[in-house]
Image (cartoon, rainbow, N blue to C red):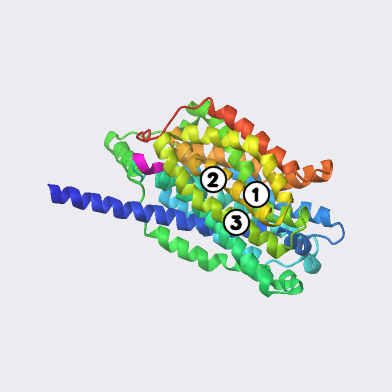
Amino acid sequence: MGNNDNHSHHEYVVQLRKAVFGAAIGNMIEWFDYASYGYLATIIAVVFFAPGDKTAALLGAFAVFAVPFIIRPLGGIFWGHYGDKIGRRRTLIYTISIMSVATFCIGLLPSYAKVGVLAPVLLFLIRLLQGFAASGEYAGSASFIAEYAPNNKRGLLVSMVPASTAAGLMFAALITAILDYYLSPGALNSWGWRIPFLLALPLGIIGLTIRLRLEDTPVFKEMEEKTKQTNEDEKRGLAELGKYWKELIIAFGVVLLNAVGFYTILSYMPTYLMEQMHFSRLHGTLITLVTLFTYVFMLPLVGTLADHVGRKKVLMVTCVIFILATYPIFHLLAMGKFLAVLALFLLGACLAGNDGVLATFLTEMFPTSVRFTSFGLVFNTGNAIFGGTAPLMATYLIAKTGNEYAPAFYLIAAACVCLLALTQTHETANKELER
């Protein structure tokens, strides 16, 4: 009996490792695809939009950056519903396939100089497809890992989802820095910008191969088995979602800081450093890597901390830190050199305090039958309204107010809303997932 128990435990550990690696590596590849656009926004503004007004072209590029977020709430519901109906694994296979092909196609698009207004139109359509695929990835990966993880390590293991997202961003930033270093501005604007997008296809094939070898989660399979035994068509996904409307509203508020913080600090920041702080493209990208390294390093530490002291406490303390520290940190950023590096280190640490817990918290707020749908809906809606528009809003606020620190106030407002929403939640750490 002891040998059987040891064998079963070994099998579980093997499956757990495969689940975490498979979900995380696929998520990393998808977000590398997605982040490449953000890091190359200033070049995309030149390549795909009419020459003339530099600010108008940059606003156009960030408007197209925001476009996929329009479809993300619908995509979140679509993938979430089918993830709750047909399984997490199959859904994640579909999302990585669509994202990889769509991103590859961006690398093949003609420029504005060659086809005129058709260039931004084609970019718009492909970005919509990217957004549709991305809307199922984060919630699906988090649900997949959470349903494999033991109760006392769920925070640590699910933190691998935002860590892999940041790794994708870091990979995109690194590729961009290498291109900036080795290529002339003319070569980068002509053909070099296409390289990260073209890499999406071989990377996507690697991620797809890994995911094809995974099994679905024990929690989902348990729900499937229960349905077969009772011969009842259990309500799942959209059919069951209405029962949790209060939890959905609260979760939406909790997501807000992640939505604004992630896209302001990790995606918009290179452009902010170049346009407002007058860093070179290479220096702006390299110094942003400091934020990403800090963020990735801190995430598992925060996830582990949340396993010990609770999700709610960590999230609330992080909100308070954002409210008090964001404006001073932006002042440090403006001072340049070492102080700019320190500022980005602090921003990365602050963001990790939220994101290292958020995914786990959302998976624990809802039962298995609606977990993917609920997570997908609130996460993607929050990111659609406040995340995808964060670079656009930051650029607009600076242009309208003339205050280069305006993005800090946007982050502070998001932290206030998140803190208020958290007061309406209860602790979920170290408990069985609701079936």
Q: Amino acid at mark 3?
A: Val
Q: Is residue 48 left or right of residue 229?
A: right
Crowd tier of the residue under label 1, counting other residues whose Cα lies within 10 Å: few below 14, some 14–19, many 20 or above: many
Quadrant of the image occupied by residue 175? bottom right
Q: Residue furthest front?
A: 338
Q: Is residue 61 left or right of residue 78?
A: right
Sequence-earlier tag: 3 or 1: 3
Rendered location of residue 152, percent (x, y) = 35, 40
Q: Is residue 430 left or right of residue 180?
A: left
**Main secondary structure along the magenta-highlighted residues:** helix
| Rendered position, 348 above or below 284 | above
Rendered location of residue 10, percent (x, y) = 24, 53
Q: Amino acid at mark 1?
A: Ala
Q: Residue at x 73, y 47 (%)?
A: 392
Q: Residue furthest left?
A: 1
Q: Residue furthest right?
A: 52
Mark 2 lies on a secondary structure that is helix
- The Cα atoms of the two marked residues, 1 and 2, are separated by 14 Å
Q: Which mark is residue 343?
A: 1
- The Cα atoms of the two marked residues, 2 and 3, are separated by 13 Å
The magenta segment is 151-155
The residue to which callout 3 is attached is 290
